[in-house]
Amino acid sequence: MSVSNQVANDIQTQQQAPWWEILLVMFLSLGISLISPSLKLIGILIPVAYLIIERRMRHRTWTEIGFNLHGIPTGLRQNLGWILLVGVGIQALAAFCSYYFLPAYFQHILARLPLDLTSLNVGLIVALGISTLGEEILYRGLFQARIGTFMPATGAIVLTSLVFAWMHYSSGAALIVMIDLTSVLIDSVIFGIIFQRSQNIFVAWIAHFLGDIVGVIFLLMMK
Protein backbone atom coordinates (compact mmCIF):
# COMPACT_ATOMS: atom_id res chain seq x y z
CA MET A 1 0.00 0.00 0.00
CA SER A 2 1.33 3.43 -0.93
CA VAL A 3 1.95 6.12 1.67
CA SER A 4 -0.82 8.31 0.22
CA ASN A 5 -3.34 5.44 0.39
CA GLN A 6 -2.31 4.67 3.95
CA VAL A 7 -2.79 8.31 4.96
CA ALA A 8 -6.21 8.41 3.28
CA ASN A 9 -7.28 5.24 5.12
CA ASP A 10 -6.02 6.62 8.43
CA ILE A 11 -8.01 9.83 7.92
CA GLN A 12 -11.15 7.86 6.99
CA THR A 13 -10.78 5.67 10.08
CA GLN A 14 -10.29 8.71 12.28
CA GLN A 15 -13.45 10.31 10.88
CA GLN A 16 -15.65 7.27 11.51
CA ALA A 17 -17.93 7.63 14.53
CA PRO A 18 -19.05 4.58 16.54
CA TRP A 19 -22.61 3.50 15.74
CA TRP A 20 -23.87 4.04 19.28
CA GLU A 21 -22.73 7.66 19.37
CA ILE A 22 -25.16 9.08 16.85
CA LEU A 23 -28.01 6.85 18.06
CA LEU A 24 -27.45 8.12 21.60
CA VAL A 25 -27.60 11.74 20.42
CA MET A 26 -30.68 11.09 18.29
CA PHE A 27 -32.73 9.31 20.94
CA LEU A 28 -31.59 11.70 23.68
CA SER A 29 -32.88 14.56 21.55
CA LEU A 30 -36.13 12.70 20.86
CA GLY A 31 -36.59 11.68 24.49
CA ILE A 32 -36.17 15.18 25.86
CA SER A 33 -38.62 16.58 23.32
CA LEU A 34 -41.22 13.91 24.16
CA ILE A 35 -40.88 14.25 27.93
CA SER A 36 -41.75 17.93 27.78
CA PRO A 37 -42.64 20.02 24.72
CA SER A 38 -41.26 23.04 26.58
CA LEU A 39 -37.82 21.40 26.43
CA LYS A 40 -37.97 20.84 22.68
CA LEU A 41 -35.42 23.60 22.06
CA ILE A 42 -32.92 21.77 24.27
CA GLY A 43 -33.67 18.60 22.36
CA ILE A 44 -32.71 20.41 19.16
CA LEU A 45 -29.62 22.13 20.57
CA ILE A 46 -28.05 18.83 21.71
CA PRO A 47 -27.54 17.44 18.17
CA VAL A 48 -26.52 20.91 16.93
CA ALA A 49 -23.78 21.04 19.56
CA TYR A 50 -22.79 17.48 18.73
CA LEU A 51 -22.50 18.30 15.02
CA ILE A 52 -20.22 21.28 15.68
CA ILE A 53 -18.00 19.46 18.21
CA GLU A 54 -17.86 16.21 16.28
CA ARG A 55 -16.92 18.00 13.04
CA ARG A 56 -13.93 19.62 14.72
CA MET A 57 -12.85 16.47 16.57
CA ARG A 58 -12.95 14.29 13.45
CA HIS A 59 -11.75 16.99 11.04
CA ARG A 60 -14.72 16.83 8.72
CA THR A 61 -15.14 19.55 6.13
CA TRP A 62 -18.46 21.30 5.65
CA THR A 63 -18.61 19.87 2.13
CA GLU A 64 -18.31 16.34 3.52
CA ILE A 65 -21.27 17.06 5.76
CA GLY A 66 -23.32 18.17 2.74
CA PHE A 67 -22.89 21.94 2.51
CA ASN A 68 -22.12 22.05 -1.20
CA LEU A 69 -23.22 25.25 -2.92
CA HIS A 70 -21.52 24.36 -6.21
CA GLY A 71 -23.44 21.09 -6.42
CA ILE A 72 -26.89 22.66 -6.14
CA PRO A 73 -27.64 23.00 -9.91
CA THR A 74 -26.63 19.39 -10.61
CA GLY A 75 -28.52 18.14 -7.58
CA LEU A 76 -31.66 19.99 -8.63
CA ARG A 77 -31.53 18.59 -12.16
CA GLN A 78 -30.97 15.04 -10.96
CA ASN A 79 -33.80 15.18 -8.44
CA LEU A 80 -36.31 17.47 -10.14
CA GLY A 81 -39.01 14.80 -10.25
CA TRP A 82 -38.68 13.99 -6.55
CA ILE A 83 -38.62 17.70 -5.66
CA LEU A 84 -41.80 18.45 -7.61
CA LEU A 85 -43.48 15.37 -6.15
CA VAL A 86 -42.84 16.27 -2.51
CA GLY A 87 -42.84 20.03 -2.98
CA VAL A 88 -46.02 20.38 -5.02
CA GLY A 89 -47.82 17.12 -5.81
CA ILE A 90 -48.10 15.61 -2.34
CA GLN A 91 -48.89 18.96 -0.72
CA ALA A 92 -51.72 19.64 -3.16
CA LEU A 93 -53.15 16.13 -2.73
CA ALA A 94 -52.96 16.32 1.07
CA ALA A 95 -54.61 19.75 1.18
CA PHE A 96 -57.41 18.75 -1.21
CA CYS A 97 -58.19 15.45 0.53
CA SER A 98 -58.06 16.92 4.02
CA TYR A 99 -60.23 19.92 3.19
CA TYR A 100 -62.95 18.05 1.30
CA PHE A 101 -62.92 14.60 2.89
CA LEU A 102 -61.33 14.95 6.33
CA PRO A 103 -61.88 18.44 7.75
CA ALA A 104 -60.69 17.31 11.20
CA TYR A 105 -57.26 16.60 9.72
CA PHE A 106 -57.22 20.04 8.09
CA GLN A 107 -57.96 21.66 11.44
CA HIS A 108 -55.37 19.49 13.16
CA ILE A 109 -52.65 20.74 10.82
CA LEU A 110 -53.66 24.35 11.41
CA ALA A 111 -53.63 23.81 15.17
CA ARG A 112 -50.20 22.15 15.37
CA LEU A 113 -48.35 24.73 13.26
CA PRO A 114 -46.34 27.11 15.46
CA LEU A 115 -46.66 29.92 12.91
CA ASP A 116 -49.34 32.57 12.44
CA LEU A 117 -50.99 31.83 9.11
CA THR A 118 -52.74 35.12 8.50
CA SER A 119 -50.85 35.76 5.27
CA LEU A 120 -47.79 34.67 3.32
CA ASN A 121 -45.53 37.52 4.38
CA VAL A 122 -41.77 38.01 4.43
CA GLY A 123 -41.51 37.11 8.11
CA LEU A 124 -43.31 33.81 7.55
CA ILE A 125 -41.14 32.96 4.54
CA VAL A 126 -37.95 33.70 6.48
CA ALA A 127 -39.18 31.62 9.43
CA LEU A 128 -39.99 28.69 7.15
CA GLY A 129 -36.62 29.01 5.43
CA ILE A 130 -34.67 28.94 8.68
CA SER A 131 -36.70 26.14 10.27
CA THR A 132 -36.56 23.86 7.23
CA LEU A 133 -32.83 24.42 6.78
CA GLY A 134 -32.26 23.58 10.44
CA GLU A 135 -34.29 20.39 10.11
CA GLU A 136 -32.39 19.28 7.01
CA ILE A 137 -29.04 19.90 8.70
CA LEU A 138 -30.07 17.79 11.69
CA TYR A 139 -32.07 15.00 10.12
CA ARG A 140 -30.29 14.55 6.81
CA GLY A 141 -26.82 16.07 7.27
CA LEU A 142 -26.35 14.63 10.75
CA PHE A 143 -28.69 11.73 11.55
CA GLN A 144 -29.18 10.14 8.13
CA ALA A 145 -25.60 10.65 7.00
CA ARG A 146 -24.10 9.21 10.20
CA ILE A 147 -26.54 6.29 10.46
CA GLY A 148 -25.79 5.53 6.81
CA THR A 149 -22.18 4.69 7.75
CA PHE A 150 -23.24 1.53 9.61
CA MET A 151 -26.65 0.79 8.08
CA PRO A 152 -27.92 0.49 4.47
CA ALA A 153 -29.15 3.76 2.99
CA THR A 154 -32.78 2.60 3.02
CA GLY A 155 -32.60 1.80 6.73
CA ALA A 156 -30.96 5.15 7.49
CA ILE A 157 -33.67 7.02 5.59
CA VAL A 158 -36.51 5.13 7.28
CA LEU A 159 -35.08 5.36 10.82
CA THR A 160 -34.35 9.07 10.45
CA SER A 161 -37.81 9.67 9.00
CA LEU A 162 -39.49 7.86 11.90
CA VAL A 163 -37.75 10.18 14.33
CA PHE A 164 -38.53 13.19 12.13
CA ALA A 165 -42.22 12.28 12.04
CA TRP A 166 -42.42 11.68 15.78
CA MET A 167 -40.83 15.08 16.46
CA HIS A 168 -43.85 16.56 14.65
CA TYR A 169 -46.32 14.76 16.92
CA SER A 170 -49.27 16.75 18.13
CA SER A 171 -52.02 15.30 20.34
CA GLY A 172 -55.47 14.71 18.94
CA ALA A 173 -57.82 11.97 17.79
CA ALA A 174 -55.86 8.75 17.17
CA LEU A 175 -56.84 8.42 13.50
CA ILE A 176 -56.06 12.07 12.74
CA VAL A 177 -52.71 11.89 14.51
CA MET A 178 -51.81 8.70 12.64
CA ILE A 179 -52.67 10.26 9.28
CA ASP A 180 -50.67 13.36 10.14
CA LEU A 181 -47.58 11.39 11.22
CA THR A 182 -47.81 9.17 8.14
CA SER A 183 -47.95 12.24 5.90
CA VAL A 184 -44.88 13.73 7.60
CA LEU A 185 -43.12 10.37 7.36
CA ILE A 186 -43.70 10.14 3.60
CA ASP A 187 -42.39 13.67 3.08
CA SER A 188 -39.30 12.88 5.17
CA VAL A 189 -38.57 9.69 3.26
CA ILE A 190 -38.57 11.66 0.01
CA PHE A 191 -36.33 14.34 1.53
CA GLY A 192 -34.03 11.50 2.56
CA ILE A 193 -34.01 10.05 -0.95
CA ILE A 194 -33.13 13.46 -2.37
CA PHE A 195 -30.29 13.87 0.11
CA GLN A 196 -29.00 10.36 -0.54
CA ARG A 197 -28.96 10.96 -4.28
CA SER A 198 -27.42 14.43 -4.13
CA GLN A 199 -25.36 14.26 -0.90
CA ASN A 200 -26.28 17.92 -0.63
CA ILE A 201 -28.16 19.46 2.29
CA PHE A 202 -29.13 22.48 0.20
CA VAL A 203 -30.90 20.37 -2.43
CA ALA A 204 -32.93 18.52 0.23
CA TRP A 205 -33.63 21.87 1.91
CA ILE A 206 -34.98 23.42 -1.30
CA ALA A 207 -37.42 20.51 -1.64
CA HIS A 208 -38.43 20.85 2.03
CA PHE A 209 -38.78 24.63 1.84
CA LEU A 210 -40.83 24.40 -1.37
CA GLY A 211 -43.11 21.82 0.23
CA ASP A 212 -43.75 24.01 3.27
CA ILE A 213 -44.37 27.12 1.17
CA VAL A 214 -46.80 25.31 -1.13
CA GLY A 215 -48.48 23.69 1.87
CA VAL A 216 -48.94 27.07 3.56
CA ILE A 217 -50.36 28.58 0.36
CA PHE A 218 -52.97 25.82 0.18
CA LEU A 219 -53.80 26.22 3.87
CA LEU A 220 -54.31 29.96 3.42
CA MET A 221 -56.49 29.42 0.36
CA MET A 222 -58.69 26.90 2.18
CA LYS A 223 -59.00 28.57 5.59
Image: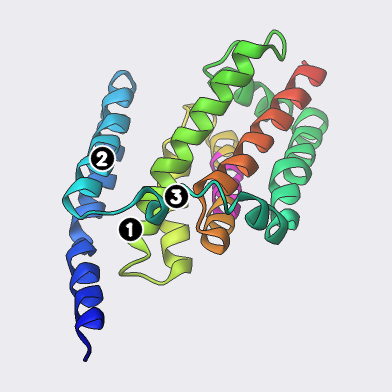
Dot label at residue 140: 3
Mark 1: amino acid: Arg
**Neighbour tally class for label 2: few under 14, some 14-19, many 20 plus, Cα within 10 Å:** few
Residue 7 image offset from top left, x and y in percent: 20, 75
Q: Inspect the image, locate mark 3, and give the three-letter code of the amino acid beneath it.
A: Arg
Q: Which mark is residue 52?
A: 2
Residue 185 on the magenta segment: yes
Residue closest to the far top:
118
Q: Is the N terminus in the top left, top right, bottom left or bottom right quadrant?
A: bottom left
The structure residue drawn at horizontal position 66% and vertical position 21%, both measured from the top left corner, is: 107
Disc ID at residue 162: none
What residue span does the magenta drawing correspond to?
181-190
Q: Main secondary structure of the magenta part?
A: helix
Name the mark on residue 146: 1
Depth check: give the residue in front, 165 or 1. Answer: 1
Report the mark closest to the observer, 3 or 2. Answer: 2
